[in-house]
Image (tube, coloured by chain):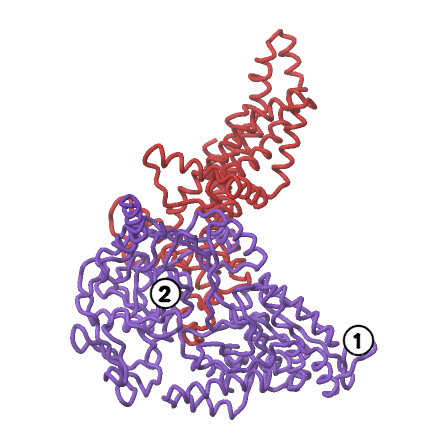
Amino acid sequence: MLTFTLRRLLFAIPTLLFISLLIFLLVDLAPGSPMSQIPLTVPPEVRLKIMEAMGANEPVMVRYVLWLKQFFVVEPLVLWVHMWGTSFSEGMQRIVSWQSRSPVMDTVVQRLPQTMTVIGTSYVLGVLIALPIGIYSAYRQYSWFDQIGTFVAMIGFSVPTFFTGLVLILVFAVNLQWFPSIYDTSLRVTDWASFVKQAKQMAMPVMVLALYNAAQISRYMRSSMLENLGADYVRTARAKGLSERIVVLKHVVRNSMIPVVTVIALGIPGIFGGAIITEQVFRVNGLGALLIGAIQGSDLPTVQTLTFIFAVLIVLFNLIADILYGLLDPRIRYD
Amino acid sequence: MKMKSALLGAACAFAFAPAAMAERGTDGNVKVLYSQAVSIMNAYLSSGTKDVEVGSLVLEPLAGFDEVGAVYPRLVSELPSLENGGISEDQTSITWKLKEGLLWSDGTPFTADDVVFTAAYCMDPAGGCAQGAKYEGVKTVEALDPLTVKVTFTGPKPNPFNAFVGSTSPILQKAQFANCMGAAAPTCTDANFKPIGTGPFMVTDFKVNDSVELAANPNYRDPAKPAFATLSVKGGGDAASAARAVVETGEFDYAWNTQINPELQAQMISGGKGQFVSGFGTLVERIEMNLTDPSPDLAEGERATVKHPHPILSDLNVRKALSMAIDRNLLVEVGYGAAGRPTCNLVPAPAIYASPNTDCLTQDMDGAKALLDAAGWTVGADGIREKDGKKFKLLYQTSVNPVRQDFQALIKGWWNELGVDVELKSIDGGVFFGGDAGSPDTFQKFYADVEMYANNFDGTDPEPYVAQYTCDKIPSPESQWQGENINRFCDPAYDALVAELIQTRDEAKRAELVIRMNEMLTKDTYTIVPLVDRGRLSAHSNTLGGVVLNVWDSEMGNVENWFRIK
């Protein structure tokens, strides 16, 4: 298992380098220029100077190599310095956003907690809702419960989050006025009252995303359960005289969880990526909102850095899912 | 009787209470919503309106523009003028006298050195200063004594109120920014996010592209202001939901630039929590005529250049007919409501510079048809006009924006009625305004027959704006398609007027020249066809008092006077 992990990690390096080049070229070739953010009242000479000061006029390859150096050398050094208090990184040029002229990594660090709390909560909630629904729907296939579960899952699957988000805002914020429609990012949870406030403002984005996640995962759980319920070992277990409870919860659920765990693990990078649309609708200042803002402003360094971080996470969680698979299922051995 | 007068007295006391209690920080928190989030507080590193305006809560210029566009003193004791000797006789220098006893929010004194430093900061060639135009023509800035600053220009400057005037040219603290000159400017993240200022508020927390928390400046020069103890600016989302948060749900007190269609405005107002305010500046939505041939049949490098005049639009009467067919009142009604008004001028304001021309305001379809007939464009068998075998076909482009697409559809309808075949094209704003010389879709390259967008000028002096239409500012492959004379308009008489305007100092004479030039571009030649004078539309809650929508400077330029209506 260790050699397998090491081999995969080594193989990830050229993959990621290739991905980074691809992202860089794609982002660069995409239409749009940071100049479009400068008002027309600014004369052309001044525009040119602004672009020069940002380094936006350099050739693509020069900027790519510079970015590689900044991402793989300067930023880790800055992190090192931040943690251990040495001074290696002094005077080194970090990856700087064209919009805010501040280091991109600082913004990412500032935004991560919001994304983790809102999107993370909705994911955990989604999983907690999905598993029991999936299990019970499969056990009582074609029952009323299963039919309703399927219906709700289909809605969660097919209705886009920007629509459910707006509907929730209209119902709960505009008409009922229960929850705020705009997420207050400056709120600090210090006592019970502020905790209630935080819970209230998280309610709608979490609901929207939990519905979406639960819909997906409950379908996986249901189909995986159905596959196992008809298996020979279940009949054997029943024939041995085991109670229905033990048959379902100990034998069937355990075996059905193997593919579902993989699906759940593969969904985790999505949490870091944030839910771009939902964050935008509720004005949650997470990573997704950062990415969309950067795309709109043609802020290439931010877009490039964020997308690459997401790529790294996806590669990493793919590996984790593979390892988990091996751990959960004794039949699978990589060595 | 006694009881009655006692009650009356008490009622009076309550009624006057807000005025009597005018004390700093008594009105709690005020929440402002910007549909574009703030990226940086330093106006010299970002020209985005949202950054400049929120920055203006903290950083102040020496003088500002009020809601009618007049200059008024902020950090100086009086405005320099020819009479008080502040402006030299030959108009080559201006001397500012700073107010005495001014303090930065950190308690240190505000001096002439800070002003001198600010000019040096922006004029550093390596800094990429976004407000470089404000310092154009400035030769030296020197401190005569701690309270006197003298700005010397390279030549006579009829309008010296440029550098240090308006929210795009605020004063930075030398002590804070001393190490941030030139190429080091972006490395000063802390200073750029939390600048020390002289304004009514100071930054307590800054979250990039999200929110800014501010608190009343304890050293603000008026001890009774601001009335609010804290101010929060939240950013992001879109104009419609921002308007809703103020006018319909009342979650926020003020929303910036809530440009939404009139129907939605009326619907939201029924929520009863707030209202819309509008003000008019110089922003004009217009159709630009291409005087050169954009035909794809021409070789790249010759397409849309002065070598090939436009086969259809070179005729004045054709351009005039196209303008006459447009019903500007309907456009305003559909797109802007109270936040727009029809105009025939490129320079709609300030009042002294605006031409009285109103010729274009009434639609004249029959007149337009007659003009085209007279010009030799006769209606063909398919209903499309033609002349010498050439069809009257136009490509009409603009940026992606719901109102602009509505306008395109309406205008296409009117032009079709004239017998003109119109093809519509809408381009993403990032590309259209991106200025990328390699893209065929920028507004400067103008690979279309007509295009629509809005433009305005900074401050109240239209000189640089009208000077954009000289022959040497025509975008071409040689200039990497940079240049502001989008129409490729070229008239030696116009160039002569521009040269004269730059030399002229007398205000009445300047106004006369600007009006003349405006008319040359609009009603004389129909090179530019103005459509709508677009106002600023913002929203504030019914409990927020003191709001004056200022379109000449920062919209929140009078934030120190805001208060809570109790």
- Left or right: B106, with B490 as reference point: left
| Location of residue B107 (image quadrant) | bottom left
Residue sitting nearer the eye, B537 or B489: B537
Q: Secondary structure at mark 1?
A: loop
Q: Would you name the residue on which mark 2 appears?
A: B45
In the image, B417: left or right of B326?
right
Q: Is residue A73 above or below residue B185?
A: above
Q: Residue type at mark 1?
A: Gly
Given residues B499 and A266, the one toward you in this image is: B499
Q: Which chain is red?
A: A
Q: Is residue B128 visible?
A: no
Element under disc 2: loop
Q: Is residue A146 visible?
A: yes
Residue B527 position, x and y percent, is 58, 82
- At horizontal 68% and vertical 22% (from top left) the residue drawn is A143
> Could you say where residue A68 lies in the image, as x and y percent from the top left?
42, 55
Q: Which residue is mark 1?
A: B383
Q: Which chain is purple?
A: B
Q: CA distance from mark 1 to mark 2?
A: 54 Å
B218 up-or-down from A191: above or below: below
In this rendering, position of residue B11 left or right of residue A170: left
